[in-house]
Image (tube, rainbow, N blue to C red):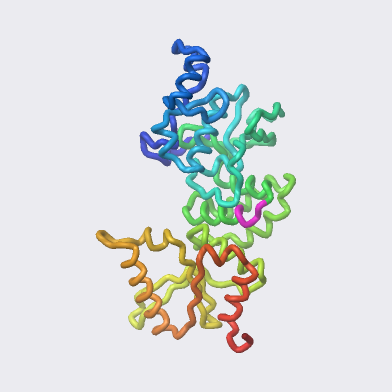
Amino acid sequence: MQRPPSLRAPGDPRNGPVILRRQLLADGFNDQAIGRLVRSGALVRIRDGAFVTPAVWHRLDEVGRHGLRCRAVLGQAKAPVALSHVSGLPEWDAPTWGFSLDDVHVTRTDGIRGRRAPGVQQHVGRVDPGDLTVVNGVPVMTPARLALETVALGHSEASLVVMNDLVHRGLVTVAELRDQYVAVQTWPGMSAAEILLRLVDPRIESVGETRTFWAIYQQRLPRPVSQYEVKDSNGRVIARLDFAWPELGVWLEFDGRAKYEEHLRPGERASDAVVREKQREDDVRRITGWRCIRITWADLRDPVRLAAKIHRALYPAAA
């Protein structure tokens, strides 16, 4: 089993600690005393027999809280298991968009099928030595294995989000994903994997960009170039466009809120970043003469309408 360094700083609330009932009993508490601690707010029950302090719980979002429930399941497990499928993604800081976090997903590493527990989906299958590692102190599947496991959950768009994130951050290569697919292609629900592997693009940087690309693909629009570089007359890169159709003279930018927040300079407000982005757009238009399409999260709610908007920009004469 490989052991990469922890991806989190010491004291990160996503690491807990999770306090198990058996630990409290060993410290002299009985069930009545534990109940009083929960009712008073001194402890938060995150699943049957597992607790955390309010200071930890209230600092976390839905994904972080799911991670704590995962740690509770691992701590209570009576068989060797590792985090898998969607439950392994938070340990790699991979997006969980589009997946339910209601249940904790684990895979038994001894190949024996066990009983289902409330709130836990226990998977059984062949686990090769290279499929398993330890991250942030917990056993978890490797990025390549996790990516293909998400395909088996039946949500292709969300799986492509995961794949693009992992390859963009260098946690796995497209070649490694393809090798993993060869090993698991007989799993139920893997029919979509071959298509997704043709769509993976390490240049795509965010959930919003992947969802935009997926909408373009689903609506059968021409495939764009990702992260297209625009250079000035001196060859200096003045902009990197989310998507571009150079032959049609059009580019597309996905305007997620984080896009402006991530690129704030010291002392700047979000409005300053918006103004700078507008200047960037003007520069690109001046150099290329192209038309710009801007879309937001709201546009992604209706892929058909979004496709019509993009089609009108790509083919204005036809519109």
In this view, 194 is above or below 79: below
Q: Which quadrant of the structure image shows residue 54?
A: top left
Question: From the image, which quarter does the N terminus lie in?
Answer: top right
Residue shown at 62%/67% (left/top)?
303
| Magenta-tinted stretch | 155-159
Residue shown at 50%/22% (left/top)?
20
Whole-percent x, y for residue 284 in the image: 41, 79
Whole-percent x, y for residue 243 in the image: 51, 71
Q: Nearer the viewer, residue 5 or 155?
A: 155
Residue shown at 36%/80% (left/top)?
232
Q: Which quadrant of the structure image shows residue 183?
A: top right
Whole-percent x, y for residue 141 in the image: 57, 39
Q: Furthest-bottom residue in view?
A: 317
How many numbered discs, if any? 0
Q: Nearer the viewer, residue 300 or 136?
A: 300
Residue 158: in magenta span: yes
The rendered magenta stretch, by its main secondary structure, is classed as: helix
Residue 104: in magenta span: no
Question: Left of 214 or right of it: where is 246?
Answer: left
Question: Left of 79 or right of it: where is 269?
Answer: left
Question: From the image, which quarter does the C terminus lie in?
Answer: bottom right
Residue shown at 65%/55% (left/top)?
156
Q: Furthest-left residue in view?
A: 267
In this view, 127 is above or below 229: above
